[in-house]
Amino acid sequence: MRPRKTAAEDRLPKPKRADLKEIEGACVCGEIVVAVVYPAFWAWHDHSKATRRAHGAAYATFIGAYKSRVRIAKGEQFLSRFLNKTTGTTRSFCARCGTQVLYERPHAPRWINIPRALFDTRTGREPRYHVGLDESVEWEYRGEAVKPLKGYPGVMIERPRKKKPIEPPDGF
């Protein structure tokens, strides 16, 4: 019979940075490279109005990690920051091409979020969470049936929805 481990012995030592595998993502122009310890801690889709405007898209997908597991591997001098004084959030982006690189929120000071699109490789997490769904827009694609648009390779078209007949108001 093995002796029972104490609480101190049960804790694993923190691995040294050299022992950890990192993945790298880059901005559009490639001047900024962000390195994250693999796997990322979580991933989600953000449908909030602020993120929609920051990315110019219906929603953005992020991965998240402890700040201690993220570093700017290249181009820190090109990193610009925008602090939203209303929400306290900070978005850092490339000063050359405008790509958002980091997203920080005041209620999670030890965490940092990075747009998933910066990475060509796997991040170790699938985005299974949705934030700000109550702020999502009606024109956002939600899995409607699509088919190829004839004469335009790679372009898909949404099948038209059947219109409901308009009912006349009462009294007519």
Image (cartoon, grey):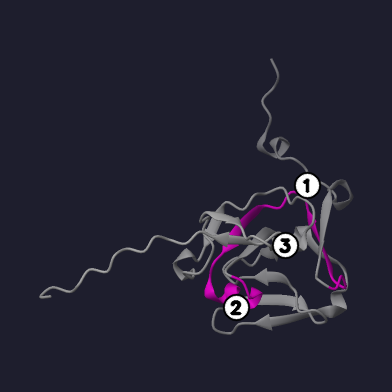
Going from N to C along the chain, the mark reached first, 2 or 1, is 1
User: Mark 1 = which residue?
Assistant: 14
User: Mark 2 = which residue?
Assistant: 53
Q: Amino acid at mark 1?
A: Lys
Image mark for residue 117: 3
Say whether residue 53 is magenta: yes
Q: Residue furthest front?
A: 151
Q: Quadrant of the N terminus?
A: top right
Cα distance, mark 2 to mark 1? 39 Å
Q: Residue furthest bottom?
A: 85
Residue located at (87% from left, 70% from top): 30
Say whether residue 1 is magenta: no
Cα distance, mark 1 to mark 3? 29 Å
In the image, 122: left or right of 44? Answer: right
Residue contact between numbered discs 1 and 3, judged by CB atoms under 8 Å: no
Residue located at (67% from left, 33% from top): 6
Viewer-closest of 157 and 4:
157
Counting from the top left corner in percent of width and height, residue 55 is at: 65, 74
